Image: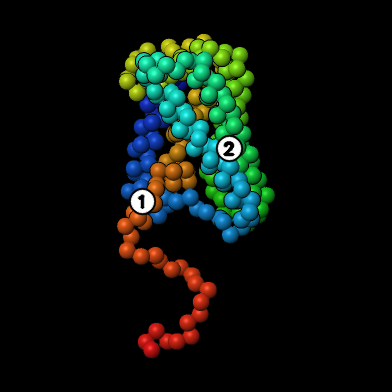
Amino acid sequence: MHGFIFGIYPYIALSVLLIGSVARYERDPFTWKSSSSQLLRRKQLILGSVLFHVGVLTIFVGHLFGLLTPLPLIEALGISHEAKQILAVVVGGVAGVFALLGGILLIHRRLADPRIRATSSVMDIVILSLLLLQLCLGLLTIIISVQNIDGGEMVKFMQWAQAIFTFDTRAAGYTAGAPILFQMHIFLGLTIFTLFPFSRLVHMLSAPIRYLWRPGYQIVRTKKRNLKHPAE
């Protein structure tokens, strides 16, 4: 089972993430959105959304570069494993708290308001709940990381992540004997990747770049009243 979760499941999750996202964009482009409900409890939405997105994006970028940066490059730059571990604990801890507080505000808003709950799908609640659980697991791993400040555990997961992308058949072996919290954190992260194409998280892959060369702005609503007939 360990070999499946850490040696095979990552490829299943990444394949579903890639193929599922492309298929959804091609087959159901009108569902490719964040489904905003900003007209309801707007202040709570803004505060929760800002905290959540800043925290999650910081964590994502940190994980991306932290796990996939080759070890020889880090050593060539003169960055010790201990320094990298301290940086990960401090930045990841602060970002994790921000994201968790924001996520709590968002899920409270979604569940406490009958109108918002009525327009929420089951997947909306499931994916947000899983993200909150993942944030809790991530924050709990900090306790173990502080006790292993030399970066030994961190190196194992860097080797595992890089082995996945280099198709190293020994990938699962790098996580053998790792603390259960870290293993749960990885497994839940892969599960979120698997559910990604079927949730509102797909809006993360969209950037409004095309608006840069759009000829003009579309006026949806204006406070000015034009009493003249358009033909006049």
Left/right placement of residue 30 relative to residue 146 reads left
Residue picked out by circle 2: 99
Q: Residue at image x 59%, y 22%?
A: 142
Could you say whether the residue bearing mark 2 is in a helix, strand or loop?
helix
Left/right placement of residue 75 relative to residue 48 reads left
For this orientation, the residue located farthest to the right is 112
Percent of width and height locating residue 149: 56, 14
User: Tag 1: residue type?
Assistant: Ile
Number of numbered tags placed on the structure image? 2
Its colouring scheme is rainbow
Q: Quadrant of residue 18?
A: top left
User: Tag 2: residue type?
Assistant: Ala
Q: Residue at image x 55%, y 20%?
A: 86
Could one spot residue 28 in this view of the protein? no
Could one spot residue 61 in this view of the protein? yes
> Camera-side residue: 108 or 23?
108
For this orientation, the residue located farthest to the front is 78
> Camera-side residue: 157 or 122?
157
Percent of width and height locating residue 105: 64, 44
Q: Earlier in the sequence, mark 2 or mark 1?
A: 2
Q: Residue at image x 43%, y 29%?
A: 64
For this orientation, the residue located farthest to the bottom is 232
Left/right placement of residue 230 relative to residue 98 reads left
Q: Residue at image x 37%, y 41%?
A: 21
Could you say whether the residue bearing mark 1 is in a helix, strand or loop?
helix
Residue picked out by circle 1: 209
